[in-house]
Image (spheres, rainbow, N blue to C red):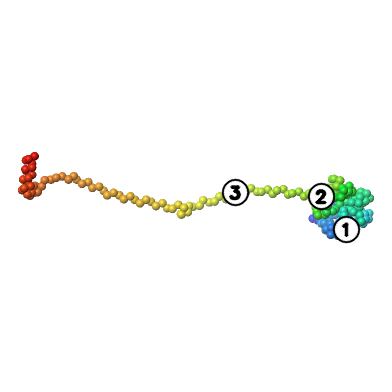
Amino acid sequence: MCQAESVTSPLPVLTVLVVDDQAPFRFAVKAVLRRLPCFQLAGEAKSGPEAITLVDEVHPALVLMDINMPEMNGIEATRRIVAAHPDVVVFLCSTHDITDLPPGAPTSGARAYINKEHFGADALRQLWHNRDSTPFARLLPPQAPPPAAHPAPAPRPQAAPQAPHPAAHPARIPPAPRPRAAPHLHHPPLTHHSNPAQTTSMPLWCRYNDTKVASMS
């Protein structure tokens, strides 16, 4: 398949005829062809009759044919070109959706159809590569990119153990010592000692009374 300008290996050059009544599209096609070394501009035409004449003159390998043109539309011009030159490949171009093409487009002899909004180097290479795969090739819809694989989350680094904050664990105050009881002093039992001095010093009437009481008891 034709690659971009970076390819250095020699490739066969395919001549291209651009047919469109709108100059901006012809200019865009020429810009795309300049990026593809294996495609080369062979000429431009603004109508169907002019395209038929140029095909007879330059015999291009590929014709990019607009569908809606004055004088003769691209479908009728394609029929006449393919009938006179079966080896010429024609791609129809328009802004129609593939489901809204005129009824005669698939049976006109064109090999493929491309929407002008999708025209580019990749689209042209793809259609040229698939030109013989189906009777009326069309640009394949772009494939959605596969969902990106989400990498597994990295393990969280374990936090280093932190020293307890002084305020979180206040210092324990030891309880105040209980007051010690005073030592118990053992007093010797009191004993009654008769004091002779006291006996002799008692008044006489006390001793008399005691003697009397004693004698009476």
Q: Which mark is residue 71?
A: none
Query: Label 3 sits on what residue type?
Result: Pro
Disc 3 from disc 2: Cα separation: 47 Å
x 84%, y 53%: residue: 94
Disc 1 from disc 2: Cα separation: 23 Å
Is 48 left or right of 176, judged from the image as shown? right
Crowding around mark 2 (Cα neighbors within 10 Å: few <14, some 14 to 19, many 20+) is some
> Do tag 3 and tag 2 residues touch (Cβ < 8 Å)?
no
Between 23 and 153, which is closer to the camera in this rendering?
23
Q: Which residue in the protein does label 2 denote? A: 139
Disc number lying in front (1 or 3)? 1
Q: Which mark is residue 21?
A: 1
> Which callout, 1 or 3, points at the residue further toward the start of the chain?
1
x 83%, y 50%: residue: 100
Rendered location of residue 54, percent (x, y): 92, 56
| Residue farthest top in this picture | 217
Between 13 and 210, which is closer to the camera in this rendering?
210
Q: Which residue in the protein does label 3 denote? A: 155
x 6%, y 40%: residue: 215
> Which callout, 1 or 2, points at the residue further toward the start of the chain?
1
Q: Give SS at disc 1.
A: loop
Query: Label 1 sits on what residue type?
Result: Asp
Disc number lying in front (1 or 2)? 1
Disc number lying in front (3 or 2)? 2
